[in-house]
């Protein structure tokens, strides 16, 4: 590990100021950053520890039902939050899948997002739940759709001087639910070979009002699956429609072969996981879709 | 080489020592404070041998910087003895049920189990396995470890 | 569950046979057990290893100058700093000697490197960060050479040759028809009867070809060691080792250091399983300590352990063909085995091949095996080396034959089972075994008689056998009687299976005392006689024999002192539970404590016990597993697992179960998720515990063990080896269960979800 300066910052202003230094990295849970520093992949000159900044460690509900989740809230805290379990079940699924209990006690959404691994488990749920990123820089606060934040494997569109402060999740519609499934060879610890999140909103007649699908580990960044979504929107929910959407999702992806899996296998899994995630959404809404 | 002064609170005692600023909490414990009960099996959070409690939550000490240890309560296996010098029920149960062989994963397993039982005093076997899924054991096959933790839970409840 | 047949042997003993807690569990659960990485000495330096980045290359030049100039670097060693060990050099270890040239090369490369990660230099510095930085400053000029990364590439005509001096042994006609260096180091053939004719004439034959990826023993503690040479030149090494004496010999040879100037102290070992028999840096640390006058500690990182810093078990490619009559009687077995030795020649596969066919009575067989080098780390042992790979093939071939003949797999095994006296593949008669007893237990057990529970996904039940010969070799101990009359046992070997506890039980039984009255320690190499390492399923049984001998001798000396003190004839005394009594009605008695207190100044009572070449206690097991296969993803869930094993006698059922449970989970790992992924450049692509996937507690079911006891005649307590065979059947068992679930066989190990799904797809098309 190369030498660095560690600094605990207790306010957003102090964080932004410190972030201006060259090669300054933000430390929340550290489960990605510290591992990468030890491997020599990241070489910060300064590390700013944001775990005591109030805006980054709170989960607050607004009157309109939206939830603002601080970027430095641990996965375990989020897993225990009843509002997230009720309104954003895909995210609830995901935060219990990241690593192990030890990792979840430290890992944060901010870290998962900003580390920008294509396999990040929390990202597809945030995308299907239309999350907005709140980003603070020297010029002030800005927002952008979370799904537009990713530039490539390990890279976001955050400027070096910016900090991800929180993620805002709008209140879901009625008759809407989300789900996240991923495939790993072991039951815990592994990086997702494929991850699939889905959110379905149904009308009173079981017609799909809105479908959002996002995939992990099948492209350089987490991606939406527009072909799959197009198969669903406006149609009554049936097993056949779900199967079509699952197959269509395969063509939205560009998986590669690596040490964890071949592209062909990933392609197969996309269809399986999208299908299963959609069925789970329907079940969570309370609608039984005969297989 | 740059040494800096670090202070931390471990097992209820305040410590101050000279550390390398790059130290992780694991190195701080083992090399600076001579608390070698916590082990290093992989160095990047994938084996759980270095599990300690930070403010009561089980974490991998190899992925916590020593600098982050200021102002938190760290608990290691050395801090578990009951008042009066006895053993924690999890420790005793592992002895009684044959839940330790080479012993290298054992301190980490104990800390994960202690964290589990503080939060869930009556866990199912599945919940026990979930709580220690981040602790890799190569010797026991987990069988007697799970029985020991269930037994310790019953002991604590009684 | 524990089944001892008609005789409740454990009831006749007071300590041996009891389910007792480990005597050393207290240290483990309090974190006070000491491993080498926990040790610190004043002035200690930290060592780091410079390793080859190439899979195959000549070393042209090494310049350590810039690194030595770095402030804090105290010494650097390369191959020139060690004794020149020639090819073919061996040390007198074990049954047939041990390849010392191989040991030297896995510790330091000389002139050539044969795998990524092979050590090229060692640095000692005042701080590990400085040592790490020094590695970058050592300039090594390599001439990269073409590398071969697998068995097929190594065997191909025209393949780049790894060792110019290696010519295939065991063949009249060399492979590819040219007499010259080859990557095929040896061929071994075991044959009996007329296998070709018998296979032709067989009513039914099945054939299976399998490939097995390299895996790793997966010990959680990376190699660690501390060496210190004192002012008189006496070197001490504190080691995590399976054998302190064998470690001492290896260090002594590498350094040309007399053994009287070297002591190895075994500390706790955080798992070995065969991977910590050879030294991995100990000699280098002694040399660095000699050069610097300071203690030197080396602790490998996990990445180093996987990326060439230790020896994994062998990858393999096997083809097994079996033939039988309509009633399932075997008539022929034909096996073709290829073992991937890694970067240096390995062992003849003879032992492994013979083990693979041993459990079946079959009049005609031909087993042909090859040892092949590739540019990967030189392999080392892992619990019955070669066994689980061979049985992955053999048990699937047998199971496929059962399916072909529509015969129950258990009935098939019962029909063909080897018994005591049946002829083993190399022609000798089987010593006492209880395979048919094991199979009877399986037949009656709910794991076999319960119907397979149904579910939404395909499910199947598999059966597989396992056999391992084990070894005996030499074990020594020493017993001294303390001033309070209690025996103190020093073992000459390391404890990897709970032998401190089981030997305490044996000594307590011999002295008729409680286990708490006996102290057992591992001895350093200067305080107890030579013992081979803890390996080869040999230690508990042979050390028990040594303890029995030493106990008997100590009690004889105590008896003679008691007799003198009681003024009686030694033969007239009876001994029971720590007291000698006069048989006659005078009733005078004397306790061990009283004897010692009365005779303290007469000299110590220290008696040795040695066991060499104890009759073998071969190991046999049978496993049954139920699996569920997710037919859309290929993921396999093991629903139920039961392991039956004949242990001769269980010294301590808890310890025996622990060995079996742990081995089964290791086997499940290699069967389903563990495998090394080497790139074409020779680098391991999954050199971390994230992507080298060892089972977590969530990945395995509860493991049920059934202990069967068919004692070995003429051996103290009738003990068999225990620790190796429980891994041998696992992959074959799971493969057979999967085959029954999905109707097709998976022939690559590990049977990852991707491979299982591919097998499902291929059989559907």
Image: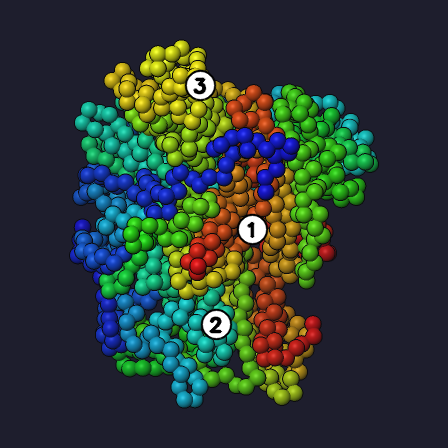
Q: Chain of mark 2?
A: A
Q: Which mark is residue C126?
A: none
Counting from the top left corner in percent of width and height, residue A194 is at 53, 63
Q: Which residue is mark 1?
A: C702
In three-dimensional space, the C-alpha distance between marks 2 and 1, rounded to whole angstroms, equals 29 Å
In the rendered image, residue C78, in percent from the top left (x then y), is placed at 30, 33
Q: Are marks 3 and 2 in contact (CB under 8 Å)?
A: no
Q: First in sequence, mark 1 or 3: give its number.
A: 3
Residue displayed at 54% across by 30% down: C12
* Residue shown at the point (39%, 62%) measured from the top left: B118
Residue wearing tag 2: A92
Quadrant (top left/top right/bottom left/bottom right) for the C terminus of chain A = bottom right
Percent x, y of residue C742: 70, 53
Q: Tell me whether marks 2 and 1 sit on the same chain.
A: no
Give SS at disc 3: strand
Q: Element type at marker 1?
A: loop
- The tag on residue C574 is 3
Bin the neighbour count of mark 2 within 10 Å (Cα to Cα): few under 14, some 14-19, many 20 and up.
Answer: many
Q: Which of the colour schemes (rainbow, by chain, secondary structure, one colour) is used? A: rainbow
State left or right for residue B31 relative to residue A277.
left
Label 2: state its secondary structure: helix
C709 vs C522, nearest the viewer: C709
Rendering quarter of residue C561:
top left
Mark 3 vs mark 2: same chain? no
């Amino acid at each position: 590990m190369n030498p660095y300066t560690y600094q605990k910052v207790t306010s957003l202003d102090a964080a932004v100021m410190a972030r201006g230094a060259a090669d300054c990295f933000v430390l929340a849970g550290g489960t990605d950053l510290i591992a990468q520093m030890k491997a020599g992949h990241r070489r910060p000159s300064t590390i700013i520890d944001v775990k005591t900044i109030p805006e980054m460690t709170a989960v607050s509900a607004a009157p309109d039902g939206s939830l603002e989740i601080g970027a430095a809230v641990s996965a375990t805290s989020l897993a225990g939050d009843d509002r997230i379990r009720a309104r954003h079940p895909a995210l609830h699924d995901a935060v219990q899948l990241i690593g192990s209990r030890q990792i979840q006690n430290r890992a944060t959404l901010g870290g998962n997002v900003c580390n920008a691994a294509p396999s990040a488990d929390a990202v597809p749920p945030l995308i299907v739940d239309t999350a907005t990123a709140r980003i603070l820089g020297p010029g002030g606060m800005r927002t952008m759709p979370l799904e537009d934040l990713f530039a490539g494997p390990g890279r976001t569109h955050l400027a070096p001087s910016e900090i991800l402060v929180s993620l805002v999740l709008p209140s879901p519609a009625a008759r809407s639910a989300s789900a996240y499934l991923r495939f790993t060879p072991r039951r815990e610890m592994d990086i997702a070979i494929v991850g699939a999140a889905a959110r379905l909103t149904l009308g009173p007649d079981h017609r799909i009002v809105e479908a959002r699908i996002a995939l992990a580990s099948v492209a350089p960044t987490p991606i939406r699956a527009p072909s799959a979504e197009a198969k669903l929107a406006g149609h009554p929910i049936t097993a056949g429609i779900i199967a079509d959407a699952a197959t269509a999702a395969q063509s939205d992806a560009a998986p590669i072969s690596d040490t964890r899996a071949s592209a062909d296998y990933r392609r197969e899994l996309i269809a399986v996981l999208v299908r299963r995630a959609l069925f789970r959404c329907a079940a969570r809404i309370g609608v039984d879709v005969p297989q | 080489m740059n040494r800096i002064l670090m202070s931390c609170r471990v097992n209820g005692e305040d410590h101050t020592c000279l550390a390398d600023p790059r130290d992780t909490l694991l190195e701080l414990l083992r090399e600076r404070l001579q608390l070698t009960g916590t082990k290093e099996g992989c160095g990047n959070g994938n084996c759980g041998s270095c599990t300690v409690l930070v403010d009561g939550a089980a974490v991998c000490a190899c992925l916590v910087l020593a600098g982050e240890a200021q102002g938190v309560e760290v608990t290691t296996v050395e801090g578990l003895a009951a008042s009066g010098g006895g053993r924690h029920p999890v420790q005793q149960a592992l002895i009684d049920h044959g839940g330790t062989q080479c012993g290298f994963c054992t301190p980490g397993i104990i800390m994960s189990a202690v964290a589990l039982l503080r939060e869930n005093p009556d866990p199912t076997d599945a919940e026990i396995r979930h709580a220690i899924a981040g602790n890799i054991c190569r010797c026991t096959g987990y069988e007697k470890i799970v029985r020991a933790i269930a037994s310790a839970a019953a002991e604590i409840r009684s | 569950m524990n089944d001892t047949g008609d005789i409740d042997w454990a009831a006749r003993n007071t300590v041996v046979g009891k389910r007792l807690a480990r005597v050393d569990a207290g240290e483990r659960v309090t974190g006070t057990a000491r491993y080498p990485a926990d040790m610190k000495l004043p002035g200690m330096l930290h060592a780091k290893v410079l390793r080859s980045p190439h899979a195959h290359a000549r070393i042209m030049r090494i310049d350590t100058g810039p690194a030595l100039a770095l402030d804090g670097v105290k010494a650097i060693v390369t191959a020139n700093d060690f004794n020149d060990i020639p090819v073919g050099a061996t040390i007198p270890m074990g049954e047939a000697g041990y390849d010392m040239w191989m040991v030297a090369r896995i510790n330091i490369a000389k002139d050539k490197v044969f795998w990524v990660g092979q050590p090229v230099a060692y640095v000692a510095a005042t701080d590990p960060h400085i040592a790490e930085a020094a590695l970058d400053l050592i300039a090594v000029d390599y001439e990269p050479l073409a590398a071969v990364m697998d068995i097929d590439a190594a065997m191909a005509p025209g393949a780049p040759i790894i060792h110019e001096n290696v010519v295939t042994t065991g063949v009249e006609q060399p492979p590819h028809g040219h007499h010259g260096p080859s990557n095929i180091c040896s061929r071994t053939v075991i044959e009996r009867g007329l296998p070709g004719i018998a296979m032709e004439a067989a009513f039914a034959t099945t054939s299976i070809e399998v490939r097995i990826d390299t895996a790793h023993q997966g010990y959680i503690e990376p190699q660690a060691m501390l060496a210190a040479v004192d002012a008189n030149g006496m070197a001490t090494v504190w080691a995590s080792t399976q054998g302190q004496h064998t470690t001492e010999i290896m260090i002594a040879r590498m350094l040309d250091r007399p053994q009287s100037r070297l002591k190895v102290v075994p500390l706790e070992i955080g798992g070995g399983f065969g991977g910590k028999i050879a030294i991995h840096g100990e000699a280098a640390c002694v040399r660095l300590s000699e050069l610097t006058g300071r203690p030197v500690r080396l602790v490998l990182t996990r990445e180093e352990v996987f990326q060439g810093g230790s020896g994994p078990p062998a990858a393999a490619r096997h083809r097994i063909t079996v033939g039988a009559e309509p009633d399932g009687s075997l008539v022929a077995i034909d096996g073709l085995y290829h073992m991937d030795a890694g970067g240096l020649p390995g062992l003849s596969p003879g032992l492994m091949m013979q083990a693979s066919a041993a459990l079946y009575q079959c009049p005609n067989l031909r087993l042909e095996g090859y040892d092949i080098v590739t540019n990967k780390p030189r392999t080392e042992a892992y619990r019955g080396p070669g066994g689980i790979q061979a049985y992955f093939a053999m048990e699937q071939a047998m199971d496929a034959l059962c399916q072909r003949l529509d015969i129950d797999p258990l009935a098939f095994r019962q029909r063909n089972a080897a018994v005591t006296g049946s002829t083993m593949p190399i022609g000798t008669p089987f010593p006492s075994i209880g395979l048919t007893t094991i199979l009877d237990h399986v037949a009656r057990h709910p794991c076999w008689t319960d119907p397979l529970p149904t579910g939404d996904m395909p499910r199947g039940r598999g059966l597989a056998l396992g056999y391992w010969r084990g070894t005996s070799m030499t074990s020594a101990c020493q017993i001294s009687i303390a001033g309070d009359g209690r025996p103190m046992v020093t073992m000459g070997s390391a404890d990897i299976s709970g032998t401190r506890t089981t030997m305490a039980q044996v000594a307590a039984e011999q002295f008729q005392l409680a286990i708490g009255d006996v102290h057992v320690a591992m001895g350093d190499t200067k305080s107890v006689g030579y013992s081979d390492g803890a390996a080869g399923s040999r230690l508990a049984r042979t050390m028990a024999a040594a303890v029995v001998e030493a106990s008997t001798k100590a009690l004889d000396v105590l008896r003679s002192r008691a007799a003198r003190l009681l003024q009686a004839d030694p033969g007239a005394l009876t001994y029971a539970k720590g007291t000698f009594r006069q048989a006659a009605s005078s009733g005078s008695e004397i306790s061990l404590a009283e004897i010692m207190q009365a005779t303290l100044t007469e000299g110590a009572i220290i008696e040795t016990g040695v066991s060499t070449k104890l009759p073998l206690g071969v190991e046999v097991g049978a496993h049954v597993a139920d699996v569920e296969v997710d037919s859309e993803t290929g993921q396999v869930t093991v629903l139920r697992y039961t392991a039956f094993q004949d242990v001769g006698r269980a010294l301590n059922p808890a310890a025996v179960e622990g060995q079996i449970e742990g081995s089964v989970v290791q086997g499940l790992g290699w069967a389903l998720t563990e495998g090394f992924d080497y790139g074409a450049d020779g680098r391991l692509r999954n050199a971390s515990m994230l992507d080298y996937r060892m089972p977590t507690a969530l990945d395995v079911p509860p493991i049920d063990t059934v202990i069967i006891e068919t004692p070995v005649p003429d051996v103290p307590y009738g003990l068999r080896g225990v620790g190796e065979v429980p891994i041998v059947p696992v992959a074959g068992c799971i493969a057979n269960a999967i085959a029954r679930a999905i109707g097709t066989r998976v022939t690559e190990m590990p049977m990852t979800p991707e491979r299982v799904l591919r097998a499902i797809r291929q059989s559907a098309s």
